[in-house]
């Protein structure tokens, strides 16, 4: 079996990763980073020690079950139901960290704690705030060694999946590490998910300097991260509570526990082809089809059509069930994007996409109602729905049935459902390389040109404070311009004639 190494870096990425690993089996190698704060360097140091955070009720129950498995298995159904309700209430109201709902036992080498000089996590909110971390080569080398340990444990590595919270300083840390990966594992494909908490994308009022700094962070982060991966998937709409999902899901944007569950479910679904068995003459295709490894997926999406490396992630959660034949024939209308700042226009004859569905086994059912067919598409199907384990949040509305069937298109005002009421849900997810991502790229390219490259740009001082010289800023701007090239062939013709 070809294995994948998954790295998650900081902040919201750890929330997403915790849900993601709750879905997974123990066969896949996993590795994560966490962050810590350390006192700033100064001549006089005051040491403050806080009490360790205690385990919540859910984590305590896991420990008790591990110590006394016979006791937990012998509990009556009524007792178990009462206990589970208490656990769900604990999770809904008491999750403060991504570890509060993680069921995974991590390898000792999996967790790496960053030691920096910042004292307030809220100030670790831009690309330049991680300067001291990425300049500490002892830490970078330790990260390299930990990754090397897991890569060497793989018999055949199919690629590296990277989940990063790119909304702040962790973007700089990830870029530095991705650069090392590109140098050390030249032929290993890298699939990058850039995830953001919806609350960081809210339309809060900012002064001009903060707005410029935010725009420059997005541009620099995008330029650096995209330079060292083969495919980038931005994830994080401004609001999930006000999206199309509000008809079926009750999501509180202020709770990372909620938003990260949706992102993790989408990532889990789109990566199903990596875990399917290879087909052969004697293979049983009754339950799944469409196996891909990471390299094959990247070749489909970024080496064909426009050869664009930035893709949108669309999801239907839940997807129409097998009994709803009309909705299944129009699955295209049920897919909505988790990628921010993209166009709603989806009629692109040069688009390339990979669709994963937990029910559909015929590509004809997917595209029969679509006017403009993609230039190339790949369909993976599995009849195994997404499980809803106990730590999954109670985000389903009353119009969702026990097995994820959509009972009505109208949201019901009732208590949200969770793992006690719903066992599994059908999912559909799609990675789409099309002109829809053009506004996302244009905005970042334009911000860097306007605030960083243009003569007298007010953001040039900010970039200088972040450690970027004029030449490096121009290189980043040129890289973003190249990412726009596949959508504007005339730009390449002009540059060639020059």
Image (cartoon, rainbow, N blue to C red):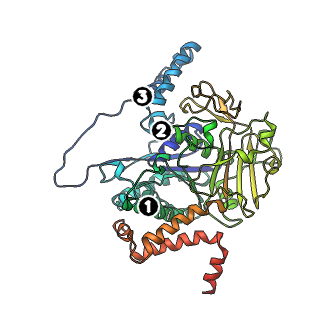
- Labels 3, 1: front one: 1
Q: Residue 296, position in %: x, y?
A: 69, 57
Q: Residue 204, position in %: x, y?
A: 43, 50
Q: Between disc 1 and disc 2, whose residue precedes? A: 1
Residue 141 is left or right of residue 228, and the answer is left
Kindly check if marks 2 and 3 are in contact, taking CB atoms under 8 A apart as contact.
Answer: no
Residue 296 vs 420, above or below: the answer is below
Q: Which residue is drawn at 41% across and 63% down?
A: 212
Query: Under tag 3, what secondary structure?
Result: loop
Task: Report which residue position mark 2 lands on.
Answer: 255
* Furthest-left residue in this view: 44
Mark 2 → mark 3, Cα distance in angstroms = 17 Å
Q: Residue 308, position in %: x, y?
A: 64, 65
Task: Report which residue position mark 3 lands on.
Answer: 56
Query: Under tag 2, what secondary structure?
Result: loop
Q: In this view of the protein, which residue sits in the foreground, 436 or 8?
A: 436
Q: Between disc 3 and disc 1, whose residue precedes? A: 3
Q: Between disc 2 and disc 3, whose residue precedes? A: 3
Residue 49 vs 379, above or below: the answer is above
Residue neighbourhood size for the residue with mark 2, other residues' Cα within 10 Å, grouped as few (<14), some (14–19), many (≥20): some
Does residue 22 appear in the picture of this structure?
Answer: yes
Which quarter of the rendering shows the C terminus?
Answer: bottom right
Residue 146 is left or right of residue 251, and the answer is left
Q: Residue at x 48, y 74 (%)?
A: 475
- Labels 2, 3: front one: 2
Does residue 76 appear in the picture of this structure?
Answer: no
Residue 467 vs 35, above or below: the answer is below
Q: Which residue is drawn at 50% across and 23% down?
A: 65
Q: Which residue is drawn at 76% across and 62% down?
A: 375
């Amino acid at each position: 079996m070809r294995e994948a190494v998954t790295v998650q870096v900081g902040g919201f990425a750890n929330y997403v990763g915790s849900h993601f690993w709750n879905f997974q089996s123990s066969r896949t190698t996993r590795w994560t980073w966490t962050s810590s704060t350390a006192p700033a360097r100064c001549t006089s140091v005051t040491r403050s020690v806080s009490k360790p955070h205690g385990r919540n009720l859910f984590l305590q129950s896991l420990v008790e079950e591990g110590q006394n498995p016979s006791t937990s298995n012998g509990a009556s159904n009524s007792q178990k139901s009462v206990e589970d309700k208490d656990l769900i209430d604990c999770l809904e109201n008491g999750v403060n960290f991504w570890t509060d709902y993680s069921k995974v036992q991590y390898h000792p080498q999996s967790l790496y704690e960053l030691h920096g000089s910042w004292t307030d996590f809220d100030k670790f909110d831009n690309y330049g705030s991680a300067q001291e971390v990425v300049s500490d080569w002892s830490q970078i080398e330790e990260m390299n060694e930990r990754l090397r340990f897991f890569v060497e444990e793989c018999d055949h590595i199919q690629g590296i999946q990277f989940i990063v919270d790119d909304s702040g300083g962790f973007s700089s840390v990830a870029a530095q590490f991705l650069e090392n990966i590109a140098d050390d594992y030249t032929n290993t494909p890298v699939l990058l998910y850039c995830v953001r908490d919806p609350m960081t994308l809210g339309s809060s009022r900012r002064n001009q300097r903060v707005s410029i700094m935010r725009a420059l962070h997005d541009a620099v982060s995008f330029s650096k991260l995209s330079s060292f991966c083969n495919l980038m998937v931005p994830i994080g709409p401004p609001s999930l509570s006000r999206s199309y999902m509000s008809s079926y899901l009750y999501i509180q944007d202020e709770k990372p526990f909620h938003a990260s569950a949706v992102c993790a479910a989408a990532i889990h679904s789109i990566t199903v082809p990596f875990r399917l068995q290879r087909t052969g003459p004697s293979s049983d295709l009754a339950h799944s089809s469409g196996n891909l490894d990471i390299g094959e997926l990247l070749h489909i999406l970024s080496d064909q059509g426009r050869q664009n490396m930035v893709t949108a992630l669309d999801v239907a959660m839940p997807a129409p069930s097998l009994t709803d034949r009309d909705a299944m024939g129009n699955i295209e209308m049920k897919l909505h994007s988790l990628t921010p700042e993209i166009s709603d226009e989806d009629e692109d004859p040069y688009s390339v996409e990979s669709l994963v569905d937990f029910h559909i086994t015929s590509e004809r059912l997917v595209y029969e109602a679509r006017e403009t067919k993609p230039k190339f598409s790949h369909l993976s199907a599995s009849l195994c729905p997404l499980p809803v384990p106990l730590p999954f949040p109670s985000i389903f509305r009353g119009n969702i049935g026990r097995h994820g069937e959509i009972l009505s298109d109208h949201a019901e005002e009732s208590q949200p459902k969770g793992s006690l009421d719903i066992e599994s849900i059908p999912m559909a997810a799609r990675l789409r390389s099309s002109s829809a991502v053009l506004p996302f790229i244009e905005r970042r390219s334009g911000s860097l040109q306007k605030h960083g490259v243009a003569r007298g740009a007010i953001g040039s001082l900010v970039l200088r404070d972040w450690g970027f010289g004029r030449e490096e800023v121009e290189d980043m701007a040129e890289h973003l311009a190249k990412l726009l090239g596949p959508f504007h062939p005339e730009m390449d013709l002009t540059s060639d004639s020059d």
